Image (tube, rainbow, N blue to C red):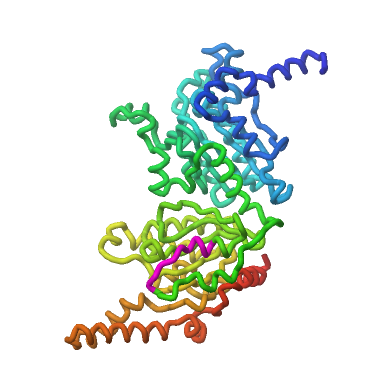
Amino acid sequence: MSNHSAYRTFVDRLSKTKDSAREKSTKKRKSLGLRTARENLDDLVDPGSFLEFGAFAVAAQRNRRDYEELQLETSADGILTGFCNINEDEVGEDNSHAAAIIYDYSVLAGSQGFFHHQKLDRICEKAEEFSLPVVIFTEGGGGRPGDTDVTTQIAGLHIPSFSTWARLTGKCLKIAVNNGYCFAGNAVLFGCSDFMIATKQSWIGMAGPAMIEGGGLGVYDPKEIGPAEEQYKNGVLDYLAEDEKEATFIAKKLLSYFQGNLSDWSIDDQTKLRDIIPEDRRWAYPVRDVIEILSDRDSFLELRKVYGRSVITGFIRIEGKPFGLVASDCQQLGGAVDSEAAEKAAAFIEICNAHNLPILSLVDTPGFMVGPDSELEGSVRRMATLLVSGAKITSPHIAIFLRKGYGLGAQAMVGGSFHDPIYTASWPTGEFGGMGLEGAVKLGFRKELEAETDPKKKEDLYNKLVERSYEKGKAIEAAAHLEIDAVIDPADTRKVILKALKTNFI
């Protein structure tokens, strides 16, 4: 080691940024079963790849606290930022470049201070400049009132951090991870992200206890505010993880779909798809089984699973190529697209489209959810978001109808029109119509049905009319009338998707 005094000073100062030098705070995290900020960082980024910004920053409190104390107790001013590589072994060095932002709750409860904001702004500006995806860990309590060195501002509301972060939307993929408390400004960063992952030990709210009490709204324990289980049910969270380890794993896997192809993949027996749809068209089936068989093994990652449940959103790979997936779940509302499902799918499509990720629609829907209760949910406006997002799709889009394709809901599931995707195909089990067969018969043949007074004959007539409509709306007839492009062997679905994708020069 060099004997030069400047070098020794540098080494000593650098050591104070490490967990080993911050023994008290490190032990506290461990005693709670939690990881330190640098442990989360090390798990997220590829070994040796992190290029840190602002490691020597401390809280702007030199006029009220000892500088040596600040170096240890407010290391990096509570936020680790830098360039890095993530998933290089899977996607290659060129595709693995990213930026990482890790909040450190052991520093003043992960609060946002003067230099903290400067670090956040700089890494966001660089991410935008180089079009880097960003993974952010957001644990923290929001704004910090104790930075007394700052004498040139009153409220600090002119800082650009939140607009800088929000401006990355559509340019740089943003994945947020949270464990623990996430309130106020930290929650804003979390909520402005493209994808939001939280552990079961998370509490996320636009205000913490102090702000709520200060506003005269009562006294609350922090664990009463935005518990993760509730935020998952109400659609805030994309994924609810057991702990920090799983949350970090999911963040890396989610990012990988936007980083490119994988060379190592395997598949299930595709002939299973030929018999997976029940013979009786009234029976539901687990569409996730279809997805698992169709996609590369272990490549399916579902998001927002318990919200908007009649439409599944997530990611798959086919021969290593990533796709954003939008799929009907006929076990939920018969596959009808309700307001929650429409908004969920619309937001998901917008993200995939912004980053030119191919979109695959697997459709089995009787259409939009209808009725007075649906209208009370604001369905006219909320369902329309799916059509608006679909009309903006410029990334490759392929549609496969598994069974039902009825009405505006079916059109919305494939971008607004059956002719909008590159290729629209159906399995032989497909059936199509302007509305559900049963409703169409009741509406279109009302006079004939009302004229029949014998209940048994009326039922027989009704069933006969439904069967006739079904025969007219079968997939092969729809293909013969060029409303869809083809009817395909279910076992060939992967091949069809890849051929369509190659046509788009991907």
Q: Residue at x 44, y 78 (%)?
A: 431
Above or below: residue 389 compared with residue 253: below
Q: How many marks?
A: 0
Residue 283 magenta = yes
Residue 113 magenta = no
Q: Residue at x 52, y 48 (%)?
A: 194
- The picture quadrant where one finds residue 486 is bottom right
Above or below: residue 271 compared with residue 121: below
Left or right: residue 188 compared with residue 15: left
- Residue 144 percent across, percent down from the top left: 47, 25
Is residue 439 in view from this perspective? yes
Left or right: residue 301 compared with residue 474: right
Q: Residue at x 62, y 34 (%)?
A: 41
Residue sitting nearer the eye, 399 or 89: 89
Q: Residue at x 48, y 39 (%)?
A: 199
- Residue 316 percent across, percent down from the top left: 58, 58
Q: Quadrant of the C terminus?
A: bottom right
Is residue 357 in view from this perspective? no
Left or right: residue 262 compared with residue 138: right
Above or below: residue 149 compared with residue 264: above
Residue sitting nearer the eye, 215 or 286: 286
- Residue 162 percent across, percent down from the top left: 50, 39
Tell me which segment is drawn in magenta.
Answer: 282-291
- Residue 423 percent across, percent down from the top left: 57, 74
- The picture quadrant where one finds residue 496 is bottom right
